[in-house]
Image (cartoon, rainbow, N blue to C red):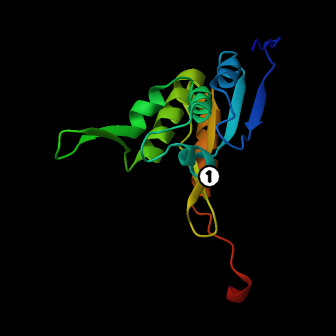
């Protein structure tokens, strides 16, 4: 994807809201290499991406291809799976307990490398308090980074809506 941005004062913000691992890393590379864009991403780690990563590591090829596109390669797989040897000497593959955190750290680290700055993510939870996605920001400017960090820190204080019976 070739992105052409003309003019010194041309800048932009891209709000990216994929419904699964459908935001291809090449799109972020195209935006990041311009050094003129900030991105705000609804990263659906809990509600979509983490569900595609099976406990056994037996992942359908189409899911793996989507995850490779999302993360820009297959390095994610080495972060979320470990091998275990049983009493009989057989080796099995299993998903590590902190797989979601590892994936989030990996993704944010890659955003920081690509854009120059990446704010601390803000978790968005469902009504039961379970993380469903993370709000991410990345951009080329230190001031944007400070502002985004300040704003995203407010997201940690989001509480589930009250049920009608609680009102």
Residue 130 placement: quadrant: bottom right
- Viewport quadrant of the C terminus: bottom right
Identify which residue is drawn at 17% across, 43% down: 88
Q: Position of residue 28 (x, y in %)?
A: 66, 25
Q: Nearer the viewer, residue 76 or 65?
A: 65
Q: Is residue 109 above or below residue 150?
A: above
The residue where tag 1 is placed is 47
Q: Nearer the viewer, residue 6 or 69?
A: 69
Numbered circles on residues, count? 1
Q: Position of residue 58 (x, y in %)?
A: 47, 39
Q: Nearer the viewer, residue 138 or 90?
A: 90
- Viewport quadrant of the N terminus: top right
Q: Nearer the viewer, residue 1 or 22?
A: 22
Residue 116 placement: quadrant: top right
Residue that protrudes farthest toward the front in the picture: 88
Give left or right: position of 76 versus 154. left
Tag 1's secondary structure? Answer: helix
Q: Is residue 140 visible?
A: no
Q: Is residue 74 visible?
A: yes
Q: Position of residue 78 (x, y in %)?
A: 40, 31
Identify which residue is drawn at 56% across, 66% down: 129
Crowd band around label 1 with a 10 angstrom C-alpha radius: few (<14), some (14–19), many (20+): some
Identify which residue is drawn at 83% across, 11% down: 6
Residue 37 placement: quadrant: top right
Q: Is residue 123 above or below residue 62?
A: below
Give left or right: position of 68 versus 29. left
Identify which residue is drawn at 51% across, 38% down: 59
């Amino acid at each position: 994807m070739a992105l052409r941005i003309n003019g010194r004062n041309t800048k932009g913000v891209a709000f990216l809201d994929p419904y699964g691992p459908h935001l291809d890393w090449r799109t972020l590379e195209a935006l990041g290499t311009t050094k003129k864009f900030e991105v705000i991403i609804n990263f659906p780690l809990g509600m979509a991406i983490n569900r595609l990563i099976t406990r056994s590591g037996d992942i359908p090829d189409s899911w793996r291809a989507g995850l490779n596109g999302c993360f820009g390669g297959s390095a994610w797989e080495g972060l979320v799976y470990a091998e275990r040897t049983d009493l009989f000497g057989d080796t099995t593959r299993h998903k590590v307990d902190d797989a979601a955190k590892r994936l989030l750290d990996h993704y944010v680290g890659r955003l920081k490398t690509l854009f120059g700055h990446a704010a601390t993510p803000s978790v968005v939870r469902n009504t039961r308090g379970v993380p469903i996605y993370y709000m991410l920001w990345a951009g080329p400017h230190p001031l944007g980074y400070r502002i985004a960090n300040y704003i995203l820190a407010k997201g940690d204080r989001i509480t589930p809506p009250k049920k009608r019976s609680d009102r």
